[in-house]
Amino acid sequence: MPDTLPSPPPTPGALDGLRVIEMGQLIAGPFAGKMLGEFGADVVKIEPPGAGDPLRNWRLLQDGTSVWWQVSSRNKRSVALDLRTPEGQDIARRLIKEADVLVENFSPGTLEAWGLGWESLSALNPGLVMLRISGYGQTGPYRDRPGFGVIGEAMGGLRHLTGEPGRVPVRVGVSIGDTLAALHGTIGVLMALYHRKVHGGAGQVIDVALNEAVFNVMESLLPEYSAFGAVREAAGSALPGIAPSNAYRCHDGYVLIAGNGDSIFKRLMDTIGRADLAAAGDLASNAGRVARVTEIDAAIEQWTRTRRVADVLATLGPARVPAGKVYTAKDIHEDPHYRARDMILRQRTRDGHELDVPGIVPKLSVTPGTLRSSAPHLGGDTDAVLRQMGLSEADIAVLRGKGIVA
């Protein structure tokens, strides 16, 4: 069934002509493939015959397919190929030989066991850029441990900081460890491709560990410990060491207020009727406000708790105090700003359903990302890809009869 998607721009995509083989499953590898595909790369996703990528069956299903899958695998072609067989491995080699990028997030050593390790693939294709995402990286004493995003979040230091003080560490709410790894991996791929093109360099491996991707965004966590022996602890909704910045109770929910700039703080205090705090000399800088943060937070919440969230935002907006409500999926869906910036797009699935999906980030002015095709059925492009490789219909029929492709 044809897709209903926005028309592509008249200019080529930023990554038009880039050939990507994706061997990833679930979240991290496929998210990197999604990013590359949105900007024009031809992404061929290899899935095991039968069940395919397990993400097809995660969370809420529509006609037996996850709606998460519809986002993760848009702009990709699916080839159902059994990589555990010599014939399947040979087909993979032929595909990789002509590719620019290989994305994989198997456990370290898996591809080597299939004869598809870096040494053999780079000899076959010296320009190959290989993105490898794993729990702990391709080297080190933990390389063979099983690792998922949640474990990477814990080891990277994030889980220790999430939640209320003294309570059990909580999950951020999304698979942030996986997506952070994918984003780091995508950046690595683009840098390696730049090196290959501009400096005439060969291909290379991008080795991304889930815990390292998380650790890389942990701000001053380690330097504070190194310099002062300070261990940052969970602080709930507050921003430790920067004040005031917190979630404040309203009559009908919570509002986030970031009044931590010096001039912003004064405007906030004047707006809520606390001119005394606005004029206090010791609160003119962040250090003084941090020392009195409990008092300041109490003053702000005394003002917010008798008001509705919408009224708080309507008052703080003209005062140029950064504030916002805590959005649900429903709030996002109904917000005109999201739609004005094409961050909610309408996509038709291969099964004919109309689905609102997230738009594309980042926004490039000349070569923006596009939705060219919706997520594929399992093996929906197997025959077309094999024919492009030069296999005949008879060859494909033999492989299908053996269960090597589907």
Image (cartoon, rainbow, N blue to C red):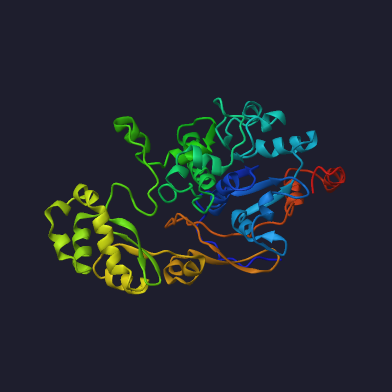
Where is residue 309? Give x, y as percent: 36, 71
Which part of the image, by quadrant, shows the N terminus?
bottom right
Where is residue 77? Give x, y as percent: 67, 52
Classify residue 149 by image quadrant: top right
Q: Is residue 224 visible?
A: yes
- Nearest the viewer among 168 and 148 is 168
Q: Is residue 188 visible?
A: no
- Residue drawn 15% across the image and 65% down it: 275
Where is residue 95? Give x, y as percent: 69, 40
- Residue drawn 70% across the image and 51% down it: 78
Q: Is residue 234 above or below residue 204?
A: below
317 left or right, relative to 283: right
- Nearest the viewer among 125 and 4 is 4
- Residue drawn 45% across the image and 48% down it: 167
Q: Is residue 340 above or below residue 124?
A: below
- Nearest the viewer among 118 and 390 is 118
Classify residue 227 by image quadrant: top left
Where is residue 265? Give x, y as percent: 21, 59
Q: Is residue 104 above or below residue 277?
A: above
256 left or right, relative to 130: left
Q: How many marks?
A: 0
Which residue in the rendered view is the most extreme toward the front? 166
